[in-house]
Image (spheres, rainbow, N blue to C red):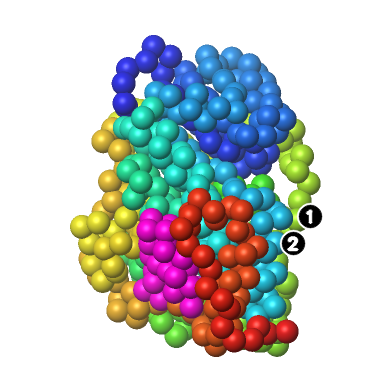
Amino acid sequence: MTHSRMNGVKVALIGAGGFVFPFRLIGDLLSFPALRDAQLCLMDIDSERLANVAGATRELVAHHGFPTQVQETTDQREALRDADIVIITFQVGGVEAYRHDVDIPRRYGVDQTVGDTVGPGGVFRFLRSVPAYRALAEDARELCPEAQFINYANPMAMATAYLNAQGLRTVGLCHSVQGTTRMLARTLDVPYDEVSYRCAGINHQAWILEFRRGTEDLYPRLRETMLARHQPGRGAQDLVADDGDHSGAADAASTYEGGNEQVRTAIMDAFGYFQTESSHHASEYLPYFRKNPALVEEFIPQRWDYYEICAAHDVTGDLSEQLTALKDHLAPSVEYGASIVNSIVTGTPSVVYGNVPNHGAIIENLPADACVEVPCLVDANGVQPTAQGELPPQLAALNRTNVNVQTLAVRAALTGEVEHVHHAVALDPLTGAQCTLQQIRAMTEELLEAHAAALSEVFPRQHAAPAAGPARP
């Protein structure tokens, strides 16, 4: 805790106007008795959406008779002042900016099914968010320098690395680990509370290194089952995944892919371990699965397009439905955020999977400037990553292909060197499999131009170099 307060911990939720994810987090916080006297300060730049969420929060608090204080503000400084915990759930640019992230690369043959955490789309979602992150850091260093920051915004690795580089003590949270391990337990018909596991790697490409039930190694049965059900070209069988992408910023982030796991099964077959992000999204991280429409159809027969989901999403969300459910039964979800706050406030230890800087070689064979996803102990001392030693070398090699993109994008933001944007996009595995260097430069220039207004603060002295070579039609 940064300081004592009569009315309990102050939690600032930045980007609270999202009608789905932020309110679910609020329900999680109120599920812990020790947090019910908290001061919840809800901040968003959209006052109308913010008012709806704040109103639902007050109604939930009143229904349960809690002493929780609920504030709403469009002033970031007011929200941050003396905050103990700051939770970030915003997205910069909205659906219109997101459209450029997916449409422009597709003209060059880079078909991103999500395009918000990796590849050209992930790089530019991060870069256009940098001014907001920078302003947040400037205010926080003045108003709540000791606060624990919890980042739910994508691209997780880039955003979390940048926030830590700005001096904010930040852990990035996703639910891929929770979702994948639950899905695998169901697949093997093993009660989840009897499963133990260990994962490590990077966000959306962490690896389930151990999966056990007591003394039984479940991996042999897992490999046999997944290979039998999910050979490429066979389509979906009876497995339903519940580990879809979770930006925490886009309201549609709770829409999950279901049905097929050909991609992750193929990755496990080739490299030995199951990864923690669903097959549609995992197909973007590597060069093997999205080379042409026929190959996409073979590995991902059910079309899943995150941009289309976001564009079609009803912005009113399901706020009233959530409110009714939380009035009837107030219990935490699988998200880690509220359990982190509870452990810091009460000192009760918990273990979460968090994204943190790889300082001190938490994963020994990944770069020091990588942002890694590892088990973390949380108690009154905060979030403490646990050392994982070396990953199996083939897994570290796969991670490094994505770390290269992430660290160069962060370097571009920190230095203002626009050429590092070109380097980051050129090193993306899927982009490199589809495009020549000339085409990659032309595509990156188009993206720089499309997002020029948002990037003027990031690259104030840089001018985009002329495009080299022809664009794809």
| Residue 1 visible in image | yes
- The residue furthest left is 360
- The residue at which mark 1 appears reads as 312
Q: Main secondary structure of the magenta part?
A: helix
Label 2 vs label 1: CA separation?
Answer: 6 Å
The amino acid type, in three-letter code, at marker 1 is Ala
Q: Nearer the viewer, residue 3 or 333?
A: 3
- Label 1: state its secondary structure: helix
Q: Nearer the viewer, residue 100 or 82?
A: 100
Whether residue 273 sits left or right of residue 108 in the image: it is left
Q: Residue at x 32, y 43 (%)?
A: 167
Contact between marks 2 and 1 (CB within 8 A): the answer is yes
Q: Is residue 415 magenta?
A: yes
Whether residue 326 sits left or right of residue 345 in the image: it is right
| Residue 179 visible in image | no
Measured along the vertical axis of the image, is residue 304 above or below residue 38? below
Circle 2: is it few (<14), some (14-19), or many (20+) Cα within 10 Å?
some
Q: Position of residue 293 (x, y in %)?
A: 70, 84
Whether residue 322 sits left or right of residue 44 in the image: it is right
- The residue at which mark 2 appears reads as 308
Q: Residue at x 34, y 50 (%)?
A: 165
Q: Nearer the viewer, residue 383 or 159?
A: 159
Q: Is residue 447 magenta?
A: no
Label number found at residue 53: none
Q: Residue at x 64, y 74 (%)?
A: 105
Q: Residue at x 60, y 23 (%)?
A: 72
The amino acid type, in three-letter code, at marker 2 is Glu
Residue 10's image quarter? top left
Measured along the vertical axis of the image, is residue 149 above or below residue 164? above
Whether residue 420 sits left or right of residue 443 in the image: it is left
Q: Which residues are magenta?
A: 400-426
